[in-house]
Amino acid sequence: MNPRRLAAILRKEMLHIFRDPRNLFLVTVSPAFLLFLLAYIFSFEVSQLRLAVMDLDRSPLSRRYVAVLTNDQDFVLARTIDRYDAIEPLLAAGQVDVGLVIPPGFADTINAGRTAQVQAVIDGSDAFAGRQAISSLGSKSARFVAGAGGVSLSAQPVEVRTQTFYNAGLKSLNSMVPGLLAIVLLMPTLALALALTREKESGTFEGLVATPVSGAEYLLGKLATYVGMGLVSACLAWLVAVLWFQVPFRGSLPVYLLLAADYFLACMGAVVLLASFVRSQQTALFIVLLVFLVPSFFLAGLIMPVETGSVRTWLTSYILPSTHFVEISRTLFLKGLGLEHLLRPALILLGMGLGAVAAALALFRKKAV
């Protein structure tokens, strides 16, 4: 391998990237832009729930209970009603999300030391909003129990006190944004796939083959260029996550960039290998979308945890580089653990990358040098 020829390939690729605004956007800015869009799309958190209250007790204690439910704006008191049959029309019209019925004798039951019950009628057409309403009512009622003693949504002989680590408010953005980084950082990989096939379509690839440039110099020069530009995009996406979405980053930024480079190597190595069999940009785009991007939304643990211990999981989820980077990203952002706790996914990505690059170099030598 000649360092001068390798540097020439690096310089050529940088010029191609910077001279084409579309390619420059795809390699550097598109991950941050996609993160901005997808984080809002995949945010399953409802900011406010509208509450209709039928207070049949009309006591200071019942009013205090409603105040506890609405004091932090998770619930907004949208209607005050006096008839039970008014709840369903409000839910059907979408004017409220929850109807709360406080029965007569609410305060007397609490003052007597017994458990008072209230009824919550919830709109289940939006499953995420419904689950959040149930969770919020339970937690806020427990807070009222601590202050008033005894009230809950249902009489339970066991009191459960929970404590959540790493994401105390259970905010979906804090979990989704780090996971989405594995998706949006596939854009530099797509740019590399298009660059490799573009040279075959335009005929410049045959000209490069005729030069003294070796297969290793050609492929490693391209890889180094796109991995380096990918790290620029990783920094921009990190800034969007931390500054715009205010996701806490408790880990080390150098470790994040090192493991992002590891992720790029795994993804781009696979693309370089696949490019040995592909000659058109359209086919390359289709393969990247079908093999990397679309499966990563559903199989990489972004939305649902990855099932462990089955052969099917290894064949569908763990074969995807994004599965391992979702784990890496969430661990660095929310748990703040160091590299020693991420060796398994880091080594898997490194093995994927090195194996794919080695196979690509072997195939390239057979076909082009």
Image: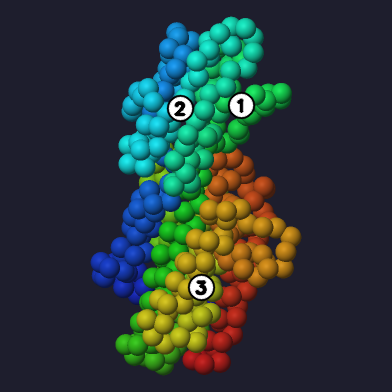
Which residue is nearer to you in this view: 130 or 236? Answer: 130
Which residue is nearer to you in this view: 182 or 9? Answer: 182
Type of amino acid under label 1: Ser
In the displayed structure, does residue 211 sit left or right of residue 326? left
Type of amino acid under label 2: Leu
CA separation in Å, label 2 and label 3: 48 Å
Q: Residue at x 67, y 25 (%)?
A: 156
- Residue 214 visible, this angle: no
In this figure, which residue is indicated by the disc labeled 1?
154
Q: Residue at x 57, y 36 (%)?
A: 166
Question: Can you tell which mark lies on residue 100?
Answer: 2
Q: In the rendering, at what x and y percent does residue 165 appear?
A: 61, 34
Q: In the rendering, at what x and y percent does residue 324 appear?
A: 60, 58
Q: Mark 1 Cα within 10 Å, few/some/many (few <14, many 20+)?
A: few
Mark whose residue sits in front, 2 or 3:
2
- Residue 107 visible, this angle: yes
Give whichever of discs 2 and 1 has the lower sequence position. Answer: 2
CA separation in Å, label 3 and label 1: 48 Å
Residue 135 falls in which quadrant of the image?
A: top right
Type of amino acid under label 3: Val
Q: Residue at x 51, y 40 (%)?
A: 131
Give whichever of discs 3 and 1 has the lower sequence position. Answer: 1
Q: Secondary structure at mark 3?
A: helix
Give whichever of discs 2 and 3 has the lower sequence position. Answer: 2
Question: Can you tell which mark lies on residue 49?
Answer: none
Which residue is nearer to you in this view: 170 or 281? Answer: 170
Q: Residue at x 44, y 17 (%)?
A: 56
Q: How is the image coloured?
A: rainbow
In this figure, which residue is indicated by the disc labeled 3?
291
CA separation in Å, label 2 and label 1: 13 Å
